[in-house]
Image: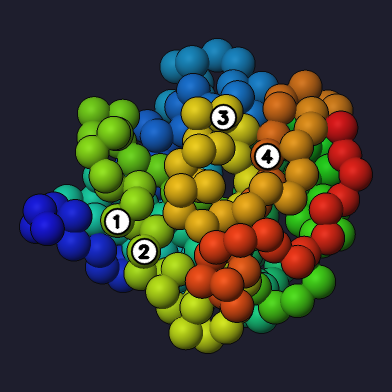
Amino acid sequence: MNASLKITKLSDGEAEEAGQTLARAFHDDPPFVHFVPEAAQRVRVLSSFFSRFARYGMVSGEVQGTADRRGIAIWLSQEHASSKLATLAGLDQLSVIFGDVGFARLSAFLTFMEKLHHDSMAATHWYLAFIGVDPTHQGKGVGTALLKPMLDRAEAEALPCYLETFLARNVPFYRKNGFNLLSEGVEPSSKCQFWTFARDPKSGGLGETSFRRPQSG
């Protein structure tokens, strides 16, 4: 394996670097374009947001990255996630970071997507909140390498995994890595198309999932 694809757990001092990588990776992601339409402003907003979210992931789950930090994955443990930890990580400042209009858009979006998540996944599970690769390094196997350690861990712990994506090109990637489609639709406030996925550890990520498939969109 290429040494740059070695996956390691990130520490608190690397939150800023992780945030910058994710900001580049998600700069053109449809929901973030909806929240912050102006491109130059979006660079600043996403760097601040993702740095805080990385800190949150470090205390409520796992944040992992490639050796060169060109790829980052933030996994949240549904057992440890809490509003108190989110506040400690600085996520209580989202209204300041996104501004009034952007924060209102973000809030409406999250209300819908979080309900969908809750309705789909009753059991304890790992939530892949964000996985991103620097645009200059995409298409080189970084995403698959990032997924493997936590998917192996989830199987060992007999825990399912959940994620959402808002790009059609990501759908075959997640299927290839053992995720099954739960729902597909359009988030009403942003008009962004979404796909939600779950991975069942009982089948090693293969075959049909037994999770609920909520009606949406």
Hey, what amino acid is under mark 3?
A: Leu
Query: Which residue is pictured at 27% across the width and 44% down the height?
Result: 141
Asked whether disc 1 touches disc 4, contact meaning CB atoms under 8 Å apart, the reply is: no
Asked whether disc 2 touches disc 1, contact meaning CB atoms under 8 Å apart, the reply is: yes
Please state the horizontal and vertical placement of residue 20, each as a whole percent of the image: 35, 41
Q: Secondary structure at mark 3?
A: loop
Please state the horizontal and vertical placement of residue 58, each as a whole percent of the image: 45, 69
Q: Secondary structure at mark 2?
A: helix
Hey, what amino acid is under mark 1?
A: Ala
Mark 1 crowdedness (10 Å alpha carbons): few <14, some 14-19, many ≥20: some
First along the sequence among labels 3 and 4: 3
Measure the alpha-carbon separation of dots 1 and 4. Answer: 22 Å
Q: Secondary structure at mark 1?
A: helix
Q: Which mark is residue 195?
A: 4
Mark 3 crowdedness (10 Å alpha carbons): few <14, some 14-19, many ≥20: few
Q: Secondary structure at mark 4?
A: strand
User: Is any atom of residue 13 visible in this view?
Assistant: no
Hey, what amino acid is under mark 4?
A: Trp
Q: Quadrant of the N terminus?
A: bottom left
Instruction: Give the labeled residue for mark 2.
Output: 148
Please state the horizontal and vertical placement of residue 102, each as a whole percent of the image: 70, 28
Viewed as shown, does residue 27 lie left or right of 180? left
Hey, what amino acid is under mark 2?
A: Lys
Query: Which residue is pictured at 75% across the width and 37% down the height?
Result: 184
User: Is any atom of residue 164 visible in this view?
Assistant: yes
Instruction: Give the labeled residue for mark 3.
Output: 167
